[in-house]
Image (cartoon, rainbow, N blue to C red):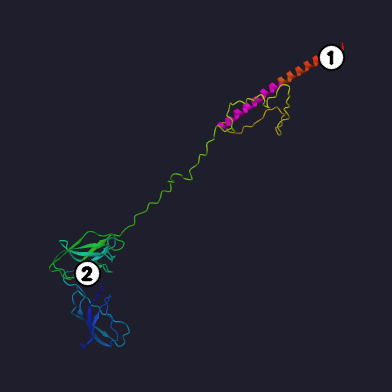
Amino acid sequence: MVLKGAVFDLYNEAGERVEEGLATNEEGSVTVTGLRPGNYYFEETDAPEHYQLSVEQHEFTIERSQTTTLQVEVENQLVDGAVVLVKVDRANQDRRLAGAEFQLESVDGTILESNLVTDPLGQILIGKLEPGEYAFRETKAPTGYRLNRTPVQFGVEGDEQGRFEVFVTNTRRTSPPTNPPDPGDPGPGDPGEPDPGDPVDPGDPSDPGPGDPVDPGPGDPSDPGPGDPVDPGPGEPGSGEPGTGIERVNDVGNSNDQHGTSNENERKENSVLPQTGEERLLYLLISGILLLSSGIYFVTRSRRRRIM
């Protein structure tokens, strides 16, 4: 862990101060350039907050042929009773979590410090604490994690030395699954639902009901009057039969269909009615011949009487 805010003075081997007031930056480092070859040392004059001042002399040497940067490491110890909170992922405790906010409370719930935020290393450093019981309470979770509402309690003993660490875990948030609409439920008015179509009106005049006989009136051209012979004419073109007044219909429908049965009954009636008309026509023809013969007979007889 790098420490910001430590202040150093630089001395040469004769004890003469070469540089003073050199403070470590955010990266915990101090850079000095332009030194002549020789022996030097750093002496810490001010320690970072919550750390003990280092009383050692940190020596180093600059060589004549040296072309690289020389690094000198200085370590600081936490003051007695200091505590470090470390924020980690519950599933992977090697992952440190920055941006979590806490407040430090005493055993009776009194807030001692607030707005304590974990740094990029997931840590919060609290300085020297008096012996007693304390608790960290999380007030804001790291981004993407659930808030840990359980206070983390710890105690500081009277003879506590150095660094004391408290680990606090967080659980990552998970997005709830979305329920896609059921493609198998098309709902009302589905265009794929078959339409039964419009029902057929049984009273349609184009489809006469079965068993409805045709009653030709006295003026019906299909019922010739007496003395008016009717020439049935040749048969229907393409039928191959002489005209008989009977229409032949080939039934190609389904015998189980109601409309097919109705049409069949109609065709049966049609085949009977022309036969009845034919008999009537025959009777009329015979009656006409008899009347004609009687007339000729009476006319001839009258002429003979006149001649005699």
Q: Do the residues labelled 2 and 1 touch (CB within 8 Å)?
A: no
Q: Main secondary structure of the magenta part?
A: helix
Residue 26, placed above or below residue 11: above
Percent coordinates x, y for residue 278 in the rendering? 69, 23
In three-dimensional space, the C-alpha distance between marks 2 and 1, rounded to whole angstroms, equals 161 Å
Q: What element carries label 2?
A: strand
Looking at the rendering, in which quadrant would you find the C terminus? top right
Camera-side residue of 67 and 282:
282
Membership of 264 in magenta stretch = yes
Residue placed under numbered mark 2 in the picture: 125
Q: Residue furthest left?
A: 158
The kind of residue on which mark 2 rests is Leu
Q: Position of residue 298 (x, y in %)?
A: 80, 14
Q: Where does the image place residue 254, in percent across and percent down from the top left?
A: 58, 33
Query: Could you classify mark 1 by the number of other residues whose Cα lies within 10 Å: few (under 14), some (14-19), or many (20 or more)?
Result: few
Q: Using the rendered image of the protein, determine whether residue 7 is visible from the camera's viewpoint.
A: yes
- In the structure shown, which secondary structural element does the residue marked by tag 1 occupy? helix
Q: Residue 276: x and y, percent?
A: 66, 22
Kindly give the residue lying farthest to the front in the view shown: 306
Amino acid marked by disc 1: Arg
Residue 266's disc number: none
The residue lying at 22 percent from left, 69 percent from top is 125
Asked if residue 218 lies in the magenta stretch, the reply is: no
* Quadrant of the snapshot with the N terminus: bottom left
Highlighted range, magenta: 256-282
Mark 2 or mark 1, earlier in chain: 2
Residue at (60% x, 29% y) in the render: 264
Q: Can you see residue 256?
A: no
**For residue 118, what is the image quadrant?**
bottom left
Residue furthest top as drawn:
308
Please give the residue where the numbered disc 1 appears in the rendered image: 303
